[in-house]
Amino acid sequence: MLLHLNNVSKGYGQPGSHAFRPVLSNLELKLEQGSVTGITGQSGSGKTTLLNIAGALDLPDSGEVLFGGEEISRYNDLELARFRNLKLGFVFQQHHLMPHLTLWENVLLPLLPRKRKTLADDISWAEHLLRKTGIWEQRNQLPGEMSGGECQRAAVVRALINKPALVLADEPTGALDETNATILADLLLNLAIEEGVTLLVVTHATDLAARLDSRYLLHNGTLKELK
Amino acid sequence: MTLLLLVLRSFRFYWKRNILVMAGVALSAAVFTGALMIGDSMRYSLKQIVHARLGSTTWVVETSDRFFTAALADSMARFIPGNIAPLFVSQGSAIADGGRDRVNRVQFIGIDSRFQTIAGSTAYGEMKEEEVIINAQLAGRLKVKAGDALLFRVAKASLVPLNTPFVSESETTVSFRSTIARVVTSEECGDFYLQNAQSTPYNVFLPLEQLNHLMGMEGRSNRLLLEGDSTQAFVDSVLSASLRPQDVGLKLDFFPDKQEFGISSERIFLDSMTWNLFGAVEEKRDVLTYFVNSIRRNNQVLPYSFVSSWSGLPVNEGEIILNDWAANDLKARVGDTITITWFEIGPLRQLVEKSHSLKVSDVVPITGEYGDSGLMPSIPGLSDAGHCREWKAGIPIALDKIRDKDEAYWNQYKGTPKAFVSCNIAKLWWSNRYGSSTSIRIPAGHFSEEEYYSVFKSSVVAADFGLFARPVKSEGLKAAEGGSDFGQLFFGLSFFLLLSAVLITALLFRLNLETRESQIGTMLQLGFTRRQLSRIFLSEGILVVLPGIVAGLLLGIGYVRIIFYFLNSLWFDIVRTSVILLQVKFTTLLAGFILTLVISSLSLWFPLRNYLGKAVVSLQHKGGTSGNPSDYSRRWWLGIIPLLAGILISVYQIVGGASQIPGYFFLSGFLILAGTLWIIKILIESIRQRQQQFIGFNSLILRSVSRHVNRSMAIVITFSLGAFLLIAVGANRSKMTLSAGEKQSGTGGFGFFAETVVPVLHDLNDPDRRLSDGLDSSLNMVQLSRMSGDDASCLNLNRVTNPSILGVDVSTLSGRFEFQTLTDGMNLVNPWLSLKEILPGNVIPAVADQTVIQWGLGMKTGDTLLYLGEKGDTLRLRLIGGLLPSVFQGYVLVDQSHFLNYFPSHSGSSVFLITNSDEEVKDELLNQYRDYGMDIIPTPEKLATFQSVTNTYLSIFMTLGFLALAIGTLGILVVVARTLLERRREMALMQAMGYSRRSLVWMMVAEYSGLLAAALSIALITAFLALLPALLDGSLTVSLTFSGLLFLGIVIHVLLWIALISFRMLNKGKLIPEIVRE
């Protein structure tokens, strides 16, 4: 099992005060290696919180997050950074590309934390991904010179550059029009399958959700599997 | 792709923003390095002034009130390498344009060809009689040039101290007219001056012999200039070894008929030093001869006679010996009672007639030792008179009392004494501060001329006769080095400017980080560690900082030039020299570079650390997680504690009753400011936490204020700090003239302060004197004697060690002026009277302005100043009290009795405090004492001259403060502009919802007005609480008009910016499309 969220709870505000708002309650989620999973739910149901906890961006109030059987909440800052860099890939609703870097540089950016220099293997892997996503020609352009769809595709490539075990995608098609949303959904799913990456997607998009192996509904802080 | 490339890309992409940060860094570097350069330049300039005013002089031999022979230079030159130049220095006035233009305090310097080498100029080569050379300062002041003629009036120098009994005061000045042969510049040593001061003197150079001639002397000088490096001991020993008796005014006469040698002095009285010098000579007689008003027996009066005494005279105390001429005249016989009457002459020629009765013990013929006209001392105007009626004795002579037989006696016997009293009684009555003998008589069998010289040479110590050598060059350089540290001063004065620049740098950098918040979040998510990110952003920051510093160093030179421009014009009061030279030292630039790099790096590091400390989620999603509201109650105390501590310090000062100490003021101000700012921060943060059911305009504004707490606080901090400093400094800008009439004020309740170049020898409070001088009978004044030294007032930038001393009868100052500090044991009811005492160890008490003690001398009350008395004895002056700022600034005051004890030759008074304040009195005095070179100014004006220095410093501080506020405002404007851009969508949305443009602008204006009002309120509260002790003890005279204007200025300044913001908003017009575009 790649990821196991075991009995996870999370809330905002001071527990016990009237301002306290529970978001996740004793939530249970298990992801197998290579699985493609979707999570849906109403706005404010805690989908992003769940994703943040799964991606070691936030800590649960209680429960544990096991990655490959290892409790990640015990990691220190340095270990967490290393973990996120090597094991995880993130795709968000906004692409969050660096406006001052070219597409090529943005894609290679995750290589920097671990390596001082870009290696030939990395170059060919990046080229492979860019060609596959159809944005090879735009590699020398700045994000400001590209379309939203192209930027989002670049964000997907950036998420895969370190060959992560798990890609977490938060509304990856949310900011795109229908055509681009379809292209990106195809790309994401195909890449996950071809590269053997486990994918956890939070989405409202029914088209995308319909194409996932398994789907869960987040409601009242717990997950309910949808058939 | 490398980290370096990443940094460089980012640097290039954000170049517009980086330029703003760079500007902030450049400003910090310019201000910081500029302050250091100002310090270097001022020190350098002061040293250059020392070299310019002294030429190649390294040592000076000087006397307080004596004239040695110019040949002493030749004697010393045999031992000391380098040139030695004799000078005759005197003071006087220069008059141009038929008397319409006059300059007092002109230095007249008699020189010979040897001065050329010292000056390093041939300008002084061939000086002719009737020609003078003047310096450019005097030429400029009188608007004259070479070839023009000027009238000069020089203080009459005399070999005899002018207040010595029986010395005529008929001539106090000598006038002469000369043509200006040449105008010399500072480079030609035209500004020659031996005192440690940076101000340029008015100099007149004339031939040494001409000045001697004008003074009725020959071959005399009172200064020797020495070149080369020598030690004090060496110069002292050479000086003593080179001295001859005539250099200290001693002369040897041989009386063949008596077979006696007589040692006497040009100064009439011989002091104990001379007696000691010849102490080992055997069979000597100590002679004291005095001029008495009358010798009387019943109704028989013998007017104006010399009475003599000597050791070994066969007469008892209470007895008198008459010569037969006197006995016949008085019809006196042995056993008769004789009354003699004489004048005891006080410091200002106050005459007190004394008399004493004695019994005639013997009547002797006018022969032998009783017929010795040489017993009469050589008194100019008296002993050399052809007739009794020609006497000029310095005392009133009733010519009608002089009979023909008195003239006949004078013709036959000259000043041969007519009566003789015992040595003890004579010394008791007639010893005075100038000495207690008029000659030493030694039988020829026990003495010779050769012995005279050899005894003198073997025993004399130059300092005993008031000849001192001092290393004038090294002292000057030391005074320049230790003088006012303008670097430190301008660092302090520019502190707010520097703080403002650093705050703006940090704020702009933080703003840049804020706009790149999501980038930081993304990079953290991509696996960058915080350390890597801080390295990346800090590297980027350093890339911005480095060119900023380099630009700042160049700007710093410009900044210094601008400051110097103002110091030479608007702020001239604090430097009083136009010779300010820029010096750029590599070490200073390096220091500026390193320190600015450290400060700037820290100003980047703190916001970066703060940002990187945030959780990844909160960076990715702006505004993210919120703080815990329960923390706020605890954090309130973090504001309340410093606030209370600051108030307690103020209360402590009020209860303690001491005057406000600047350190306490700034400490309490800082604590109160920090406390109130913290409370405001908590208040703003708590607004964000507040939950409310309804919203209105006000709550919308408050929400807006609390949205970016740090940005809001940056505005509050900048403006409150700036306004606090400006209000506090403005309040300290005192106007002394407000209480000028009061006795406790700095004027002492006196109306005028007058100074003369030539001392006035008599008592101007004497009604007879006033009548004879044509002065108003109601005139009342205090006369002070001045021993010239260095000016220790704030007008002198050098650190002086020997300030001028004023001797005054301190009882005349009772109840006047106010003491800021007093040492233990002082008379608290009338501290002035403490000056009459002598402290243990023969230490003399003295007082000075507290500012002089603290800043001019770098000392504190209780410390001791060391001087050399006229007789070479060490004068220890303990500063027992410090006055509040007064007209005495620059001087040290001692009681007149102590003054005359240590400087007995000092004659007359040169400083006057006049109780009247009528202009007529001023005109009268000026008219009467014009030839004395009198300058007279109202005391408030005198005080204002000193106050102008303080106020100029405050002006600089405020100017730089306003500049800082303006720069701070510009920085804030950038923040506001950026905030506005960020809120365009929000504004558009609100317009779409139906908010009018007017209401939106009002909200914006109200938001920033509120922050500024908070800042100004904090500043007012802080200034009030911190200044409360000074306000209550009355030591602070708050100029409400000035503070009000200042406050108004700040408000207008602020409102202008708000208006600009409103204007910007109104003209941005089409906001709604913004939302459509989004």
Image (cartoon, coloured by chain):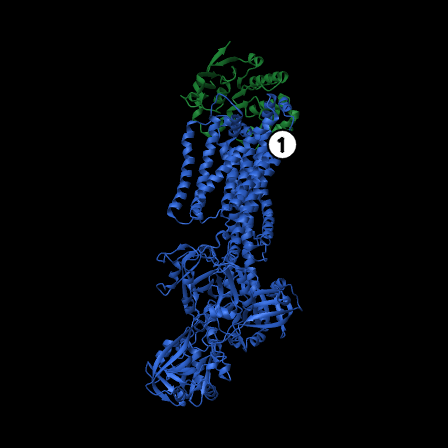
- Mark 1 falls on what kind of element? helix
Q: Where in the figure is residue A133, as x and y percent of width and height?
A: 62, 21
Q: Amino acid at mark 1?
A: Arg
Tell which subunit mark 1 falls on: B
Can residue B1060 be seen in the rendering of this structure? yes
Left or right side of A6 for A122: right
Left or right side of B252 for B587: right
Chain coloured green in this rendering = A
Q: Where in the figure is residue B179, as x and y percent of width and height?
A: 64, 71
Quadrant location, the C terminus of chain B: top right
Residue labelled with disc 1: B1064
Q: Residues within 10 Å of mark 1 (few under 14, many from 20)?
A: some
Q: In the rendered view, would you say B252 is above or below B838?
A: below
Q: In the rendered view, would you say B862 is above or below B1001?
A: below
Relative depth, front residue between B1063 and A38: B1063
User: Which hue is chain B drawn in?
Assistant: blue
Q: Where in the figure is residue B1014, as x and y percent of width and height?
A: 50, 35
Residue lying at 45% horizontally and 34% vertically, measured from the top left: B679
